[in-house]
Image (cartoon, helix red, strand yellow):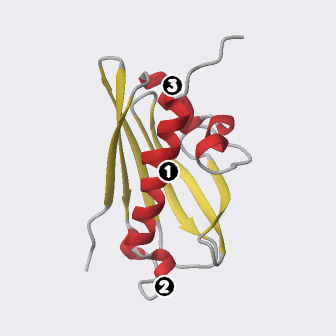
Amino acid sequence: MKSEPFVIERTYNAPVEKVWKAITDKNDMKQWYFDIASFKPEVGFEFQFEGNDGKRTFLHLCKVTEVIVNKKLTYSWRYDGFPGNSFVTFELFAEADKTRLRLTHAGLDTFPSDDPSFGKDSFAKGWTELIGSLLKGHVEQATVAK
């Protein structure tokens, strides 16, 4: 049975360019997402990072599959040593001086269904924290004048 993708939407009090930079610049990503050694918003660019669910550390293996600057970023998301492959898509929509972000994580049903680390609830909790709190705080923080 194919499951529905996980989708979360949030609106940030920040311009599209700032949100785009937050999801594509490795130094920005480190502030709210994961510490990724290198990242380029270019189709075919491969990157990896470690994530921890509190019990185990997982090596995430990702590859950029679609880029429309300031609008859309998609990459594959799989785990080293486990079956399954999914896709994470960030879509940005300018709304006056704000940005609406829709994140879709599709293909969660391809991961081992008998492992709670790969359950939809686990992804929902993680993305809600990342998109709902951490990214929001990062893009909405006041820019410190130099």
Residue 33, percent across and down? 59, 48
Counting from the top left corner in percent of width and height, residue 78 is at 54, 66
Circle 3 crowding by C-alpha within 10 Å: few under 14, some 14–19, many from 20: some
The label shown at residue 130 is 1
Position of 140 with respect to 6 (left or right) is right
Measuring 48% from the left and 60% from the top, which residue is drawn there?
126
Mark 3 secondary-structure assignment: helix
Q: Is residue 27 above or below residue 124?
A: above
**Residue receiving disc 2:** 115
* Crowding at mark 2 (Cα within 10 Å: few <14, some 14-19, many 20+): few
Q: Nearer the viewer, residue 4 or 144?
A: 144
Mark closer to the observer (2, 1):
1
Q: Is residue 56 left or right of residue 118?
A: right
The part of the image, by quadrant, that contains residue 72 is: top left
Q: Which residue occupies the extreme top position in the image?
A: 146
The residues bearing labels 2 and 1 have C-alpha atoms spaced at a distance of: 22 Å
- Asked if the residues shown at circle 1 and circle 3 are in contact, with their CB atoms under 8 angstroms apart, the answer is no
Q: CA distance from mark 1 to mark 3?
A: 16 Å
- The amino acid beneath tag 3 is Lys
Q: Earlier in the sequence, mark 1 or mark 3?
A: 3
- In what element is the residue under mark 2? loop
Q: Position of residue 5 (x, y in %)?
A: 31, 62
Is residue 88 left or right of 138 when viewed as pictured? left
Secondary element type, mark 1: helix
Give the alpha-carbon distance from disc 3 to disc 2, as whole Å.
36 Å
Of the two numbered discs 3 and 2 on the same chain, state the one appearing first in sequence. Answer: 3
**Residue farthest to the bottom?**
114
Quarter of the C terminus within the rendering: top right
The circle on residue 18 is: 3
Q: Considering the image in quadrants, where does the N terminus appear? A: bottom left
* Image vertical order of residue 75 relative to residue 77, above or below: above
Name which residue lies at 65% across and 17% down: 144
